[in-house]
Amino acid sequence: MPAARAGSTTLSERSLADSQAPMGYGATRGLERVLASCGLLLSADLQFVCAEDVPQGGVLCALPALLTQGLLRHTRTLYTLPPGYYPLESIFLYLALLALVRCPSLEQTRYEAPGEWGKLLGLDRLPEVRTLRQKLGLLCGQEGRAAQWQSRLAKEWMEGVGSEDPQKQSVGLFYVDGHVRVYHGSLGPLPRLYVARQKLCLRGTTDYWVNGLGGEPFFVVTQPVHAGLIAALREQVIPRLLAEAPELEAAKLASDPQAMRFTVIFDREGFSPKFFAELKEQRIGVLTYHKFPGENWPVEEFRTRSVGLHTGQLVARELAERGTRLSNGLWVREVRVRSSDGSQSSMLSTHGRLDLSQIAAWLPARWSQENFLKYMREHFGLDRLIEHGTTALPETTVVVNPAHRRVDQQIRRERGRLQRLTAQFGAHALPPEATVEELQKFEQEGGQLQEQIQGQTALIEQLKGQRGKIPRKVELKDLPEAQRYRQLRPESKHFIDTIKMLAYRAESALAGELREHLQREDDVRALLRRIFVAPANLRPDVEQKTLVVELHRLGSPLQDAAVAKLCDELTATQTRFPTTELTLIYRQVGSA
């Protein structure tokens, strides 16, 4: 093992020095902290020191990708912090790096080594949980600023899709899907929503995510009171896409009546011929599954065609196409894919310029968005509550009337009892060669069942009459105070969600660089997670203006070879550590 360089400290030495710091654990830059406490310091300068075996030092490999994705691009124009010890850029960078090392929450940072994280950030230690929450509160103090930040980033990401896709096939494709964030607290009544992954109705909030062809996120909108996918598309998603998505050339729209501004892709929940017609009038294409496909088409109509998936793989699919007239008279394209077992998947599109194979490839690719949401839940704590507290919803918010819901639930219960009674009456049969006593018992039991069925039917009709007199939906102000729904504080959640989107996109960018150096593509993200938590040596050189990050070996020749290639590519970016003049150089221990 290489010996520690002169002037470099070991983990044991730093641990002892941090524990003996007079101003608190790891607070070794006392003068600057005193100046900051007196209001005489705008922010501390970043000062890197030579350090051996810094835990989780490999996460600095994500820094070039984070900066490329725009982590600090709009920081100073949108956010400010009062004078203090911790620089604004360090707070943003720290939050993104915490997400990449899979720290589940801000509270969990109390179990991280504060001094070691300070070495990674060019400071003496990381902020305490209380300080970090105070900074987060200042950053999220103005409602709507996180949405503005996310909007700027989304616009840049959408414009960047064309540069990443030489054939421009994924330009103007937007996948929309809902995700329920379950709330288990008791701060205020939240609406109940059906959670498909748990098959339960639970209290929570619905987020609608907008992603690209490969699952890369663009932005997210929140529906405090669930009104459905169509309402979210009509009121929130489509207006943002019209404002932020790259515009199609006006000349092309004018010359080609079938050209579309962009195409939205969603599941059967958004099936609505009326809504399809609305979008078509705005020159917005639709790609979704048919909710009522009808009978299977004849096998003779299908032809085997080569379909290129978004992963680059070519597959053979049996495809057929017809024109279909929906209930409102709108003509759309219906494409069917026939599987090997004979089943058929029906897909609808209002985009006349899409190729048959593109429709067959792009709609099933929405599973990449499902995989994104699953990965974010498991690895980035997507559902974790960021801030305790709720805020009132506008009094004009229209919600389902609780009284109407109670009567409706009672009707469903009584219908279940009626079905059981009807089934019992149908199964009631006279035994063969019945005696007089058995015949009398059969008639008596049958008469009792008929009376119960008639009574149950009358009760249901009575309940239906009651339900008809109760308005199905009411405004929030018409409900008692205790029954009025509230919403979770949205600003901090949108802010942290944007940080997590940046972290995910940075990880995806690194995965794209690393994938070509591995034999198994499934190992890419697992290897990156291993790299992020691997120890590293830091070698700053003020004269040469460089910061060398030496990654520890991972214990596998194949993985080490892939990491070596990644280090070369990261070094070639010539990334400077934010607010310093130090250029980052990446290499493995023993490679120089």
Image: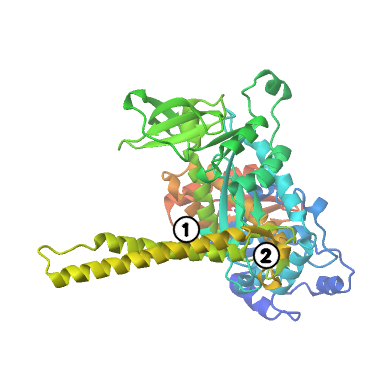
- Residue 571 in which image quadrant: top right
* Left or right of residue 210, residue 356 in this image: left
Residue topped by disc 2: 488
Q: From this viewpoint, is residue 574 visible?
A: no
As measured in the structure, the alpha-carbon distance from the residue carrying label 2 to the one carrying label 1 is: 22 Å
Q: Is residue 376 above or below residue 482?
A: above
- Residue 424 in which image quadrant: bottom left
| Residue 376: % across, % down | 55, 56
- For the point 61% across and 50% down, the residue is 208
Q: In the structure shown, which secondary structural element does the residue marked by tag 2 occupy?
A: strand
| Residue 61: % across, % down | 60, 52
Q: In the structure shown, which secondary structural element does the residue marked by tag 1 occupy?
A: loop
| Residue 133: % across, % down | 72, 69
| Residue 511: % across, % down | 53, 46
Dot 1, crowdedness within 10 Å: few (<14), some or many (≥20)? few
- For the point 42% across and 31% down, the residue is 336
Q: Amino acid at mark 1?
A: Arg
- For the point 88% across and 74% down, the residue is 38
Q: Amino acid at mark 2?
A: Leu
Residue topped by disc 1: 197
- Residue 44 in which image quadrant: bottom right
> Is residue 144 or residue 189 the one in the foreground?
189
